[in-house]
Amino acid sequence: MLLLVTGPIADCRDRGETHLGTRSEGLDMNVAVVTVGDELLAGRTTDTNATWLCERLADRGVDVERVTTVPDRVADIARVVNEYRAEYDAVIVTGGLGPTHDDVTMDGVAAALGRSLEDHEEALAWLAEDGYTRDDLAAGTAELPRGARALHNEAGVAPGVAVDGVYVLPGVPSEMKAMFETIADEFEGTPTYREAVVADEPESALLDRIADLRERFDVSVGSYPGESVRIELTGTDEATVADAAAWLRERVDSP
């Protein structure tokens, strides 16, 4: 089971879109993303990590079913991680790594897993190769949950971990992205294909045609209103998605 945590709690699907189809079959790995940080909840920092992770995971055929942001509190982190690791194949957690007083993500994850924190010799060896001695490091920098696999921070200092299906990554976007790429192959699902059709009509006027499309083609449909309506078609067969998009384009008014 994998657990991915980064920032405040939210549903990846609750972003103002109307989803008119069901989740595509064949997405055989599901993940929760947890982002950690008081600054995210206060609106002082935009949570770009969750969006980036959702996109990368979707590209790999992995279904992200939950995105949650939690404050810098050990009890909240532990509760959410513990809940999600029982429900999802993996949990990815980002943020709250480092030596400052509010960097408590490792404490929360360790509490969720019932493990103590201890100096990780492999992480210390990596840091030494990067020029950091034990005396250079702030207290707790390399303290990781007992028995965890350390993830080297190639773009920063604080290491991440993988343990019991929970992946803990830094909150700094450049560090998070670099670390995720080292474990990306551990997140695999059925490849999916997407095409978008833009309609210059009210969303309510499109419902009958979308219902007809869903009857004819084995695709999932998402409707995203704005100045125009973007209708996104998703499926596991590339030809079917292309045929469905062509069929719909012939039946809507283009901008």
Image (spheres, rainbow, N blue to C red):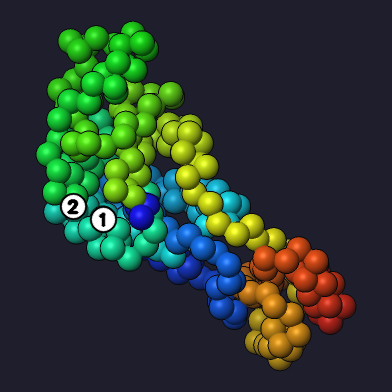
Q: Position of residue 222 (x, y in %)?
A: 62, 73
- Tell me which residue sits at (23%, 58%) in the image: 82
Mark 1, secondary structure of its residue = helix
- Tell me, yes or no, if residue 93 can be seen here: no
Which of these two is toward me, 61 or 80?
61
Name the outermost residue toward the bottom: 208
Which of these two is toward me, 186 or 101?
186
| Circle on res. 16 | none
Horizontal side of 172 relative to 76 (left or right) equals right
Q: Position of residue 183 (x, y in %)?
A: 46, 38
Tag 1–tag 2 contact (CB < 8 Å): yes
Up/down of 153 relative to 82, above or below: above
Up/down of 115 relative to 236, above or below: above
- Tell me which residue sits at (69%, 78%) in the image: 218
For the C terminus, the quadrant is bottom right
Quadrant in which residue 179 is drawn: top left
Q: Residues within 10 Å of mark 1 (few under 14, many from 20)?
A: many
- Tell me which residue sits at (18%, 36%) in the image: 146
Q: Amino acid at mark 1?
A: Val
Q: Which residue is mark 2?
A: 112
Q: Amino acid at mark 2?
A: Ala
Which of these two is toward me, 237 or 180?
237
- In three-dimensional space, the C-alpha distance between marks 1 and 2, rounded to whole angstroms, equals 6 Å
Q: Residues within 10 Å of mark 2 (few under 14, many from 20)?
A: many
Which of these two is toward me, 210 or 38?
210
- Tell me which residue sits at (30%, 11%) in the image: 128
Q: Position of residue 67 (x, y in %)?
A: 39, 59
| Circle on res. 81 | 1
Up/down of 160 relative to 52, above or below: above
For the N terminus, the quadrant is bottom left
